[in-house]
Amino acid sequence: MKIGIIGGGAWGTTLGQTLIDNGHEVLIYDINIQAVEKINQHRHPFFDTILPDSEKATTDLKEVIDFAEYFILSVPTKAVRFVLKEMNLLLNKKVTFINVSKGIEPETLKRVSEIVEEEISTDHLNGFVVLTGPSHAEEVILRKLTLLVSSSKSIELAKEVQMIFSNDQYLRVYTSTDLIGCEFGGAVKNAIAVISGACTGLGLGENARAAVITRGIIEIVRVVELMGGKRDTAFGLTGIGDLIVTASSENSRNFSAGKKIGQGISIEQIYAEQKQTIEGIRTIEALHHLSQVYHIDLPMINVAYEIIQNKLSVEDALPKLLSRDLKSEDF
Ligand SMILES: NC(=O)c1ccc[n+]([C@@H]2O[C@H](COP(=O)([O-])OP(=O)(O)OC[C@H]3O[C@@H](n4cnc5c(N)ncnc54)[C@H](O)[C@@H]3O)[C@@H](O)[C@H]2O)c1
């Protein structure tokens, strides 16, 4: 099968290697010429790894569109709408999107599947699948065991993508039809990972991390259920699974960004130092907006929002959370 990859960063380039391992052909599109050149020299743009000879990249979007009928979306969520508009102008056939970006649009609160439906005309849209779950690119590039979920409103499409990515060496993919639960789970966990990192930056320990992860899953469940997803999805790979890997690892850019926030480094400086995507900070903004619109209680996320807006110091965040009304944990 021929698969186009839109975004040749850490994750897109890594998935390209997996697809080639599984016998598929890939062509990557990226606006960053340095990344494209590196891939064409068989070097991963972010990791010290040699890529398969057949993994190629281009800065020409039309070339990728002509090449494939399946497209992986692996650009940051904030670039998704822009790139889809460009694709819609160039498309002259029906294609399937496999989204791996994890986020929601802060202004519209839209998931990526909804953005695809808005931007790609029905004449060009065959279907949408999200491929998500606990997956550091740093490990998948080394072919270390990883489990993912392929979710779509269409179980046939979800199964197709399950087959495309699964292998008996290191990658096993489950299916799901709870697209809303999978998309929100993958987005909210990045916000919680920033908060978990902030606790570490503040000098708190493993007790605090366990508390943030556990109460974080409650915030994920609230969002998933409110938006029409299934509670059980939040307790699977795409919710708690992805939360554990992201909220407890220095490999995570979201965790690392949070750690810097906890150390008192400004958001502006964090963005200046980290050129790669940090979805969690933008997702905190989106979830704060969501909690205002739907009047839903997301205490950790809303305190994190005040910090990133410079309305609350990191030192004052804990007393603010701890002085809330005492509650029961009975579910
Ligand atoms: N890195 C991981 O381990 C991982 C794992 C699972 C999911 N994800 C998700 O995948 C998405 C991408 O993450 P990443 O780590 O690969 O980020 P990255 O910053 O390493 O790569 C993003 C790439 O997109 C390119 N890009 C940006 N705007 C573009 C545009 N308009 N057109 C074409 N290319 C454009 C950039 O040049 C860059 O090469 C994020 O939403 C992230 O949450 C990442």
Image (tube, rainbow, N blue to C red):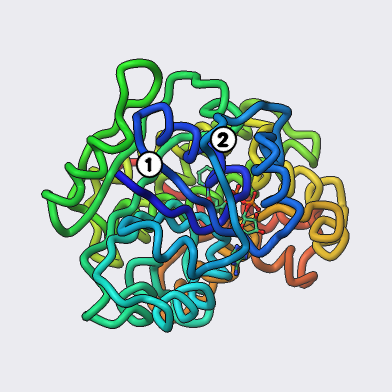
**Image coordinates for residue 21, horizontal then vertical, percent:** 41, 27
State whether label 2 is within 8 Å of ligand 1: yes
Residue 224 position (above or below residue 56): below
Q: Which mark is residue 35?
A: none
Q: Which residue is mark 1?
A: 329
Q: Is residue 187 left or right of residue 278?
A: left
Q: Assign ligand 1 to one image quadrant.
A: bottom right
Where is residue 327 drawn, in percent x and y?
Answer: 44, 49
Q: Is residue 36 left or right of residue 203?
A: left
Q: In the image shown, does 85 or 228 lie closer to the viewer?
A: 85
Identify the residue shown where x is 51% and y is 36%: 54
Circle 2 crowding by C-alpha within 10 Å: few under 14, some 14–19, many from 20? many
Q: Residues within 10 Å of mark 1 (few under 14, many from 20)?
A: few
Residue plotted at (49% across, 61% down): 103
Residue topped by disc 2: 137
Look at the numbered disc 1 and give the secondary structure of its residue.
loop
Vertical placement of residue 252 versus 61, above or below: above
